[in-house]
Amino acid sequence: MEIKTDVVSVKDQKWKEFTLINDHGMEVSILDFGGIITRAMTPDRDGKLENVVIGFNNYEDYLDNPGYFGALIGRVAGRIEKAQFELDGKAYTLPKNEGDHHLHGGEPGFHKSIWSVVPFENKEEVGLTLTLDSKDGENGYPGNLRMTVIYTLTNENALTIAYEGVADQKTVLTATNHSYFNLSGNLKTDIQEHEITLDSSEFVELDEELIPTGSILNVDDTVFDFRNGRPMKDGVSSEFKQNLVANHGYDHYFLFDHTKEVSAQVYEKESGRELKVITDQPGVVMYTSNNLPEGLKLRERESARYLGLCLETQASPASIHHDGFPSVWLDKDEKYYAKTTFVFGVRE
Ligand code: FUC
């Protein structure tokens, strides 16, 4: 096990990039800027190491990063309707960074902050502890928040992301990581043939602006039923209204049934790569890059629609305006804790 450290010069800034390496040669590179996963080298069924996440070829492009590639997201991942909420009788207004709404914590959110990073290493694992102080009123959110994110890579090819947060006032918080997975290796193909399994029988209905309507729909008899596995492309060709509002694909919060240890699973048959997601979170936003801008210069090629699969484990921002959704409210001095493990394996 090993950790390498590099310095990356971007305009007038110097970022650090840490590469976690396990005994099988699996590597995950992470920046202090945004806690961004820039690269993840995992073996295919023949043991060949290739990159399975979308990353920019030029680090400078992370300064803009309209797709939030690989980044930590917060304080609230997802959309807050009309960029406002009420807390203990007081109205809070957040910056509108997508139409009338507030998306992914605003600018600069967790994804564009420089985190303090401390590497750690022992016999079984290598990792990084990232911390960030988000000030009271930053991007309109109440309370001073201390955030800690711990990335850990094990010899089982498992990458765990653990999130902790505590604030000195009641506030809202649900963090996630916005990596775009592509198991074909080095972005050889898009993700339409990726087979996805989700332990979920319900999802959150969206309106035309991708804002939750307040209804939760059952997946029965729809292309949102991933309980027995289905290729991502089913949602591309579907005429179901929920696929159309997402621009021919998925951009939805699925509520986990939590009847299985593995909440989400992705398989790519050419490479044999399989990704298992184990989480304590109540659900996941599955985004299939339906709106990914074309022509961005990535490490291996230019970007295109359906090039990556995001599995954003989190609570639901719909809980701010509606009852009955996994809550993002966090009490003063309450400890926020969330943990998700991505296990990179193969099927023979
Ligand atoms: C996801 C989606 C959005 C958005 C963004 C980059 O989480 O919910 O629609 O396009 O990421």
Image (cartoon, helix red, strand yellow):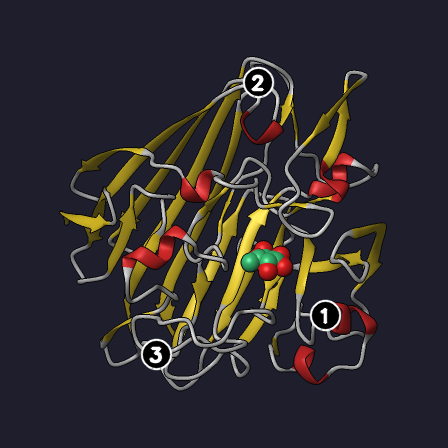
Hey, what amino acid is under mark 2?
Answer: Gly
Q: In which quarter of the image is ligand 1?
A: bottom right
Q: Mark 1 points at which residue?
A: 225
Tag 3 or tag 2, which sits nearer the N-term? 2
At 17% from the left edge and 38% from the top edge, which residue is drawn? 122
* Residue 247 versus residue 281 in the image, above or below: below
Quadrant assignment, res 87: top right
Tag 1 or tag 2, which sits nearer the N-term? 2
Quadrant assignment, res 93: top right
* Residue 322 versus residue 202 in the image, above or below: above
Hey, what amino acid is under mark 3?
Answer: Arg
- Helix, strand, or loop for circle 2? loop
- What separation in Å lies between label 2 and label 3 (alpha carbons)? 42 Å
At 51% from the left edge and 31% from the top edge, which residue is drawn? 337
Asked whether mark 2 and ligand 1 are closer than 8 Å, the reply comes as: no
How would you rate the neighbour count of disc 3 (Cα within 10 Å): few for under 14, some for 14-19, many for 20 or more? some
* Residue 275 versus residue 177 in the image, above or below: below
Q: Mark 2 points at which residue?
A: 143
Tag 3 or tag 1, which sits nearer the N-term? 1
How would you rate the neighbour count of disc 1 (Cα within 10 Å): few for under 14, some for 14-19, many for 20 or more? some
At 28% from the left edge and 57% from the top edge, which residue is drawn? 59
Q: In this view, does 224 lie to the left or right of 168?
A: right
Residue extending furthest toward the front = 12
Q: Mark 3 points at which residue?
A: 301
